Image (spheres, rainbow, N blue to C red):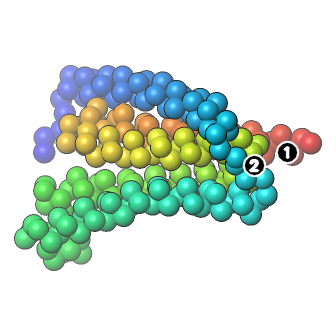
Amino acid sequence: MMPLTPEELRIEQHRVRRQAVRALFFCATVLVLARWYLPLVWTFPDGLAERIAFALQAAVFVLLWVVIGVRLVASGRYRFAEDYRGSAYGPPSPALAIKVAFLQNTLEQAVMAIGAYLALATLAPRDDLSLIVGGVILFAIGRATFLRGYPHGAGGRAFGVAVTALPMVAAYGYAIVLMALNLLN
């Protein structure tokens, strides 16, 4: 594959920035709605053990995306002769490369998401656990749009990457603020 020309790179970077801004507004909307609406219809747990259990149960929906990624790679390895022997024998074929990249990125994002959910479960006020639900919803949307957009370059996958990552960044930031406040009290 040929590297991008400086002009193509500039255009692709513009697409990435535009999609990241769209993702930021989308995430903010989903998280505000989750925080505002879910505590009205759902009682979140109070006790620490129940809160951690809640976060781990939410993590199941994140880990399902890892399962989907594993299934996509396994199916590709089964169907494509050049990939049948496995990754130890060479890089993935072009037919399998996007699926491998999706799995790798999803695994990385899942680890970070679950860490964020556990941090919120141990630190956040009870009704703020609704942000975990919002994060799970955004994770699913982010992964689906990342996979769909991957063949269209960095600009094509940028919305999905940002929708997956921004809630985690916010959750870690919020957790750090809560830890600092706990230290001050």
Residue at (10, 67) in percent of width and height: 80
Image quadrant where one finds the C terminus? top right
Q: Position of residue 150 (x, y in %)?
A: 25, 43
Residue 87 vertical position relative to residue 115 in the rendered view, above or below: below
In this view, the residue in front, 40 or 142, is 40
Q: Position of residue 108 (x, y in %)?
A: 44, 56
Horizontal placement of 117 versus 178: left or right? left
**CB atoms at circles 2 and 1 under 8 Å apart?**
yes
Residue neighbourhood size for the residue with mark 2, other residues' Cα within 10 Å, grouped as few (<14), some (14–19), many (≥20)? many
Residue at (50, 47) in percent of width and height: 136
Residue at which label 2 appears: 123
Q: Which label lies toward us, 2 or 1?
A: 2
Residue neighbourhood size for the residue with mark 1, other residues' Cα within 10 Å, grouped as few (<14), some (14–19), many (≥20)? few
Image quadrant where one finds the N terminus? top left
Q: Please tell me whether mark 2 sits on a helix, a strand or a loop.
A: helix
Whether residue 92 is visible: yes
Q: Amino acid at mark 2?
A: Leu
Horizontal placement of 134 versus 156: left or right? right
Q: Position of residue 52 (x, y in %)?
A: 68, 60
Q: Amino acid at mark 1?
A: Asn
For the view shown, which residue lies furthest in the right direction? 185
Q: Please tell me whether mark 1 sits on a helix, a strand or a loop.
A: helix
Q: Which mark is residue 182?
A: 1
Dividing the picture into quarters, in which one does residue 128 lie?
top right
Q: Which mark is residue 99?
A: none
Residue at (17, 64) in percent of width and height: 76
Horizontal placement of 53 versus 73: left or right? right
Residue at (62, 56) in percent of width and height: 55
Horizontal placement of 173 versus 148: left or right? right
Q: CA distance from mark 2 to mark 1?
A: 9 Å
Q: Position of residue 31 (x, y in %)?
A: 56, 33
Dividing the picture into quarters, in which one does residue 67 lie?
bottom left
